[in-house]
Image (cartoon, rainbow, N blue to C red):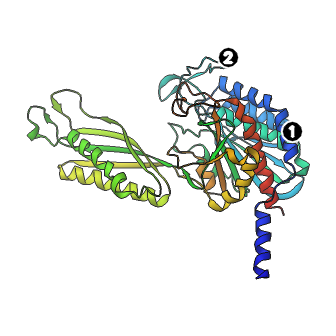
Amino acid sequence: MKRLILPFLLLSTTAFSQSNLKPAIDKKATSIESKVIEWRRDFHKYPELGNQEFRTAKVIAEHLRSLGMEVTENVAVTGVVGVLKGGKPGPMVALRADMDALPVSERNDLPFKSVNTATYNGQETGVMHACGHDSHMAILMGVAEVMASMKDQLKGSVKFIFQPAEEGVYDADIAGAELMVKEGVMKDVDAIFGLHIWAQIEAGKIGYRSGPFMAAVDNLNVTITGTQAHGASPWSSVDPIVTSAQAIMGLQTILSRNVNITENPAVVTVGAIHGGIRHNIIPEKVEMIGTIRTFGDEQQALVHRRITEIITNIAESAGAKADVNIGKLYPSTVNPPELTAKVLPSVESAAGKGNVIAMPPVTGAEDFSFFQREKPGFFFFLGGMKKGGDPLTTPSHHTPDFFIDESGFLLGVRTLSYLTVDYMEMNKK
């Protein structure tokens, strides 16, 4: 019995080791809070779309160099990577922030309201950090300054990954985290941590989930081809509009009859349907596009298979032909349960146990998942809603009225810093 207990105690101590650098982290983080807010406002005023983050990247690279880091620019087009070598041997911990803004015209009346416009998919549009990536960058720049101030005491090294094009790029097949991984940014990394500001969680709180956290996202493109005819004689046609309507309704049975929703949800949404040009002509073709959200490879494969079977067979039964194409975008963001259990005490230490919330799965998607597929990674939400706000009425992400309470930024700096030094302590060499 004694032989069994001792190794267990040693394992527990190793798993939940806490760094003695936290008081110094708190002091330094508090001293630079105003700088973090200033950086965020600057990024917010001058947002840039994916793979166009030229000014943004320059600001980041200059800051990292000023801290004495080895800096590599133009990673995955416009990304920036800085490496801070600690004074003692240990693991390489990666921290990631995304850099790109969205083609959204801001409605908020702020002193640092976005002033940029751009051409997106052939259309002129305003540009806005409508998903909080400005805050992610500013927080990680703050963490870089905190870590650099104690680099001689670090039991390992830190890789600061500033990633472009998290929102994707309409004219590129591969971008963002996927391209960074392809270019080798994760090869020397032992673990990676990242955060996302969340407008529906109160500032000062953190949300997380062990296991599948955010959904895989895939695009659905369907063409149904029938036989064109005069609208007054539908018996002469194979009507692709009626066939498409039946297919859309059939897709709903995937979620109600095929997916075990007691384990994880799934979403199949048809976002647009187009067919025909005149009120009295049954067209030859109908085109549909949509989005698919799933959790885990097995569920994803099931949903993809059923989409193809349902649409193809319904079309065939009507005498039409269906062309179904599913384009995989981002895999599911999954926090490994073992890693989550190890690092959760660090998160609770930073925020206070009562401010750390276990969340249900989120059907939004994140390309942080590509990093997690290479090395163990933990991803969490940082509250950005004003205290006392209503998550149901607070403007959500990707909208012109999206707004972030900056009072939660200090917690973001502290949490990423705590995760870094505690992970080093757990895995010191």
Q: Is residue 147 left or right of residue 40?
A: right
Name the kind of residue labelled 1 in the image.
Answer: Lys
Tell which tag, 2 or 1, sits nearer the viewer.
1
* Label drawn at residue 13: none
- Image position, residue 345 (x, y; %): 73, 54
Tell me which corner region of the image, top left, top right, bottom left or bottom right, holds residue 198. top right
Q: Is residue 27 left or right of residue 288?
A: right
Q: What residue appears at the point 82 percent right and 32 percent down from the top-left corner? A: 32
Q: Quadrant of the C terminus?
A: bottom right
Q: Quadrant of the N terminus?
A: bottom right
Distance from the alpha carbon under mark 2 to that under mark 1 = 29 Å
Q: Is residue 407 left or right of residue 108?
A: right
User: Is residue 204 in view from this perspective?
Assistant: yes
Say whether disc 2 or disc 1 marks the residue closer to the N-terminus: 1
Q: What residue appears at the point 85 percent right and 35 percent down from the top-left corner? A: 66
User: Disc 1 on helix, strand or loop?
Assistant: helix
- Image position, residue 13 (x, y; %): 80, 65
Looking at this view, is 324 or 269 the one in front?
269
Name the kind of residue labelled 2 in the image.
Answer: Pro
User: Is residue 67 in view from this perspective?
Assistant: no
Looking at this view, is 417 or 166 the one in front?
417
- Image position, residue 250 (x, y; %): 28, 49
Vertical order, 184 against 128 (above or below):
below
* Residue identified by numbered label 1: 27
Q: What residue appears at the point 67 percent right and 20 percent down from the top-left corner? A: 112
* Label drawn at residue 111: 2
Q: Is residue 294 left or right of residue 322?
A: right
User: Disc 2 on helix, strand or loop?
Assistant: loop
- Image position, residue 134 (x, y; %): 66, 32
Label 1: few (<14), some (14–19) or many (≥20) C-alpha neighbours in 10 Å: few
Looking at this view, is 233 or 152 the one in front?
152
Numbered circles on residues, count: 2
